[in-house]
């Protein structure tokens, strides 16, 4: 009798992590293990990662993979450990266990993912007159490519989702390590924006258990001390000018009234 099993059909791991792909077998006394091979297939290409033939000297193994041969021979544990996973390690891993009479295989899908880092800048804004400010949501270091980004605006009265037509995106950028980055931009105008308000960038990704939400705050317009002084000076100057004109007119009127008639 020849039995094999695996606790895995699909696994997900993060970049840089180590993971073990489970593969086990049990042989009746009349069966003897001939060989074990682990292969990886991805996008139409295949590669042998580990190969061991009983009775042959040595084994063949690619870097970063390990099978405990002692556990293999004593306990039928053919599990493979992959170290420091990268995006290039994604694919279907095939565990092939062979005897002289039979061969069985288990396929395990390995997915690599990395959650994004999110920041919004500027973190706090306020308007000057007739001004448009662009908020940037920077989403970096994620894998795989698919990601969802949305914005909301919260005021003291309500909270609404901002239409995607009011936002724009940069192109995707891919790092040497295979992760992606993108920027989402939201422009707000002093003519239409209501302050105070909170603008939040929401990011969803397969590597996240829940969305990331990062906010920036739009402050209500405030007059600075300098603006107050300038405004006060202007008001004073206007008042003095008006007073001067009134006094001149009064004096001119008095002179006319005191002149003798011809």
Image (cartoon, helix red, strand yellow):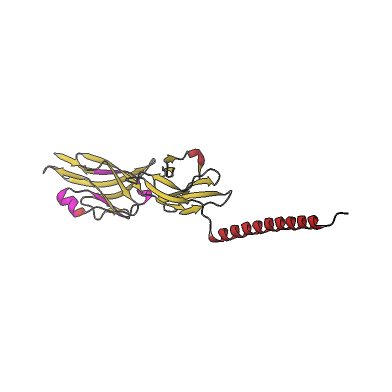
Q: x%, y% of residue 87?
A: 38, 49
Q: x%, y% of residue 184?
A: 48, 46
Q: Which residues are magenta?
A: 70-96
Q: Nearer the viewer, residue 116 or 98?
A: 116
Q: Is residue 122 visible?
A: no
Q: Is residue 102 visible?
A: yes
- Asked if residue 150 is positioned above or below residue 19 in the image, the reply reads above
The quarter in which the C terminus is drawn is bottom right
Q: Nearer the viewer, residue 25 or 114?
A: 114
106 with respect to 1 (left or right): right
Task: Please name the residue shown 72% across and 56% down the image.
Answer: 245
Q: Nearer the viewer, residue 169 or 87?
A: 169
Task: Please name the residue shown 50% across and 46% down the image.
Answer: 185
Picture quadrant of residue 256 = bottom right
Q: x%, y% of residue 84?
A: 33, 55
Residue at far front of view: 261
Q: x%, y% of residue 111?
A: 33, 45
């Amino acid at each position: 009798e020849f039995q094999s099993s695996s606790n895995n059909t699909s696994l997900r791991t993060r970049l840089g992590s180590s993971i073990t792909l489970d593969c086990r077998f049990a042989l009746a006394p009349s069966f003897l293990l001939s060989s074990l091979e682990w292969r990886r297939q991805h996008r139409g290409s295949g590669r042998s990662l580990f190969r061991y033939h009983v009775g042959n000297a040595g084994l063949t193994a690619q870097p970063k993979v390990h099978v405990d041969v002692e556990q293999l021979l004593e306990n039928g544990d053919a599990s493979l450990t992959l170290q420091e996973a990268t995006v290039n390690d994604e694919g279907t891993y095939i565990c092939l266990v062979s005897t002289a009479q039979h061969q069985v295989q288990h396929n395990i899908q390995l997915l690599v993912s990395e959650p994004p880092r999110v920041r919004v800048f500027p973190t706090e804004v306020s308007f000057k007159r007739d001004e448009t400010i662009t908020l940037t949501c920077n989403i970096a270091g994620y894998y795989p490519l698919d990601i969802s980004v949305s914005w909301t605006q919260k005021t003291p009265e309500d909270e609404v989702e901002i239409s995607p037509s009011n936002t724009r995106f940069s192109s995707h950028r891919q790092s040497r390590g295979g992760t992606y980055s993108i920027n989402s931009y939201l422009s707000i105008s002093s003519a239409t924006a209501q302050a105070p308000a909170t603008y939040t960038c929401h990011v969803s990704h397969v590597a996240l258990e829940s969305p990331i939400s990062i906010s920036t705050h739009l402050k209500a317009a405030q007059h600075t001390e300098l603006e107050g002084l300038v405004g006060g000076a202007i008001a004073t100057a206007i008042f003095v000018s008006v007073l001067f004109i009134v006094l001149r007119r009064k004096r001119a009127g008095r002179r006319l009234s005191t002149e003798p008639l011809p």
